[in-house]
Amino acid sequence: MTVSLLSSSSSAGFSLVETGFCYHSETNDYKIVKISYCNWSLNLGGTPLQAEIYSMNSGSWKRLHPHFTPDILLFNIHTDLFLIPFFSGALHWMVYVSKGKEEPARPFILTFDVNEEKFRMMETPFAVIRSYLCPLVFKGKLALTEKERDPLFLNVWVMKEYGVHQSWTKLFVVPSTEL
């Protein structure tokens, strides 16, 4: 398959842009989902989040309309060099949300269902940010790695039943001597 250069989209001026890549089997189409975030737009009364999807079949971008509450003040996407996991028909991003300066940010997993083209928020086993978290797929299950710095260790959590918050289970801990 040869892919031509992507047409431009409207993420200019955004402070953070993250992308996920997936295959939509029902339409035999490869897609790129792009989330752009601009924290200064809140001060101007704008929306801090913009989302778009690119279809390889059509060769064009389409604007998505995520329905997030307007009181979200913090929306940090932490993927760094990791691939965005595609699991159970959805892409999964790690996000941190705060609804006010007095409330600590809470970690969530932002999912994008490729069939429905809808975003959803999935709860993590954590009430507040404690560490660096990264979603992944582990042995056919949605999982999270939790990296603590002091002392340094890595926890691996697995969601035993997809979409059920109560099914998060800590599988194991890797101590700092092993990292």
Image (cartoon, rainbow, N blue to C red):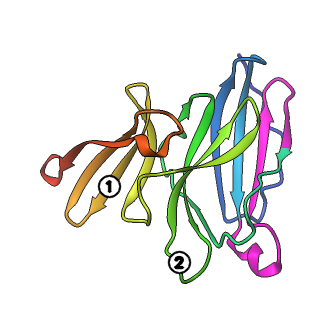
SS for dot 1: strand
Tag nearer the camera, 2 or 1? 2
Q: What x and y, as percent, mark residue 101?
A: 57, 82
Q: Which mark is residue 72?
A: none
Q: Residue at x 46, y 44 (%)?
A: 135
User: Quarter-wise, where is residue 169 in the image?
Assistant: top left
* Image quadrant occupied by the N terminus: top right
Instruction: Say if the magenta span includes residue 56.
Output: yes
Q: Is residue 47 left or right of residue 135?
A: right
Q: Residue at x 67, y 24 (%)?
A: 23
Let me know if residue 8 appears in the view.
Answer: no
SS for dot 2: loop
Residue at image mark 2: 103
Q: What x and y, as percent, mark residue 58?
A: 87, 27
Let me know if residue 140 appears in the view.
Answer: yes
Q: Residue at x 23, y 54 (%)?
A: 153
User: What is the C-alpha distance between the residues marked 2 and 1?
Assistant: 23 Å
Farthest residue in the left direction? Answer: 177
Residue at image mark 1: 147
Vertical position of residue 157 compared to residue 86: above or below: below
What residue type is disc 1 on? Answer: Lys
What residue type is disc 2 on? Answer: Glu
Q: Residue at x 12, y 51 (%)?
A: 177
Give whichever of 111, 54 is nearer the camera.
111
Give whichever of 28, 12 is nearer the camera.
28
Vertical position of residue 89 compared to residue 65: above or below: above
Q: Is residue 15 left or right of residue 79?
A: right
Label 1, residues with CA under 10 Å away: few <14, some 14-19, many ≥20:
some
User: Quarter-wise, where is residue 71 in the image?
Assistant: bottom right
Q: What x and y, as percent, mark residue 70?
A: 75, 69
First to last magenta residue range: 38-62
Q: What x and y, as percent, mark residue 127?
A: 44, 63
